[in-house]
Amino acid sequence: MKHVNHWINGARTGGEDRTAEIFNPATGEVSGKVTLATVEEVDAAVEAAARAFPAWRDASLMKRSRILFRFRELMEGHRDELAALITAEHGKVHSDALGEVARGLEVVEFACGIPHLLKGGFSENVSTRVDSYSIRQPLGVVAGITPFNFPAMVPMWMFPVAIATGNTFILKPSEKDPSASLLMARLWQEAGLPDGVFNVVQGDKVAVDRLLEHPSVKAVSFVGSTPIARYVYETGTAHGKRVQALGGAKNHMLVLPDADLDLVADSAVNAGFGSAGERCMAISVVLAVDPIGDELVEKIVSRVERLTIGPGDDPASQMGPLVTEVHRDKVASYLDLGVEEGAKLVVDGRETRVAGGRPASEARGFWLGPTVLDHVPANSRVHREEIFGPVLSVVRVKSYEEGLELINTGEYGNGTAIFTNDGGAARRFQNEVEVGMIGINVPIPVPMAFYSFGGWKASLFGDTHVHGTEGVHFYTRGKVVTSRWLDPSHGGVNLGFPTNA
């Protein structure tokens, strides 16, 4: 049975005092154990990162860039191995795990251009023989606390930019699927990254709290649920840290009557049930504008009924299990709740056959098939709350204005989409909707790495999104230098207030 532990100062380490079980979600069986960090182990990682910082900060931009290029090539060569680890511990199908790795590598590729990204500005002769210029410098030791649903991609939203800009990094991954973190650590070392620049501490709240409180940690990036994001932001900032904390979501797809309903149905199924709905950018609500609701639901159901649900390592599987039994049961509880609140249960995921065998409710493992709830009341919990599973709610609305209001009055503002063939309506939507990431006939509008990822309202705590230009700014701080080099003939004393003459 495997044992996953920490990576501190270039070596695997970790005791047996505190451990947690790792499960195979497809079978429900224990596949290993993971060490849970003590305060002392977190401190050791911070100390290693702090020792490595001065030399890494002073390393040339070209040296950093070359290491990043080598890391990118190594990751590309090990992507199948990395995807297999994700599938084994998270449960998502192998093709989806490969897609996760590919999207994470886009940020690595973006960070390879750090010599260009860190170029400052220069103004000559702002005053007589005086020049001004701007530079950006790293913060020091920074940390990333990442969720179970993307054990490779979300860390890669953070550490490539943090390391490229000259910081040293501590990753605290989810204890539910920790193995990917150690493979990435090994590949960093093989790429030539100095020991201590990238560290991994496995763990739970003990590790999180120590990172938030440790005086040597200058910044923390977090992705997870909204309650924990709020906690991380409030605790980290109270200890003087820079914090970006990305929270939960309830993403809507607004479908206007002129939309291509076949495209909409395909998109709703893809965005609602990929990765078993365990995505912060999943579409979980379809707002169907009258009179298309009945036809659209019929098209969605016909596609859902043809999906193959099975283990992630089976090439025939299109959707795998949920990550844990506790999470599966929580998601499943919303099915009965939806009916109680007045919705119609059109497709019951508990009855879905797993790999052609037993119904999901009777199969070994943490299974729940794709579920469709129609006529979901707008004021219901099923509509308002983040479910984070394969449950697609259809809310009927009478107009564009009614649909827009439901989105804008919601708690979250992570992602949204509009489906229409009317360019004017789409342009109006992108201007009026109060959401950070918007798709126009695109169901999951995750930005490319050279743009920044992040939502509004309860989906983000802090002012800075991840990766892209905002990511570079988050992991650096600016200086403006004003310099004057006197020629030998200059001299004299002048006690007057300096002016820009």
Image (cartoon, rainbow, N blue to C red):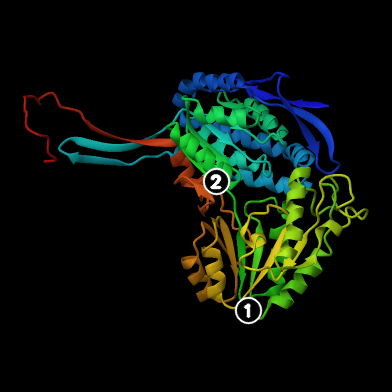
- Please tell me which residue is depicted at 75% across the width and 54% down the height of the picture: 333
In the rendered structure, the answer to whether residue 141 lies left or right of residue 290 reads left
Which numbered disc covers residue 257?
Answer: 1
Residue reaching furthest right?
A: 357
Between the residue at mark 2 and the residue at mark 1, the CA separation in whole angstroms equals: 33 Å
Callout 2 crowding tier (Cα within 10 Å): few <14, some 14–19, many ≥20: many
Name the amino acid, label 2: Leu
- The quadrant of the image that shows the C terminus is top left
Tell how many labels.
Answer: 2
Q: Is residue 80 visible?
A: no
Q: Is residue 54 left or right of residue 355?
A: left
Residue 379 figure quarter:
bottom right
x and y percentages locating residue 426 in the rendered image: 53, 71
Instruction: Give the residue at the far bottom of this rendering.
Output: 291
Q: Is residue 101 above or below residue 53?
A: below
* Image quarter in which the N terminus is found: top right
Which image quadrant for residue 446? bottom right
Q: Residue at x 70, y 18 (%)?
A: 15
Q: Going by the image, does 486 lie left or right of 37?
A: left
Q: Which mark is residue 246?
A: 2
Instruction: Check disc 1 and give the amino acid type.
Output: Pro
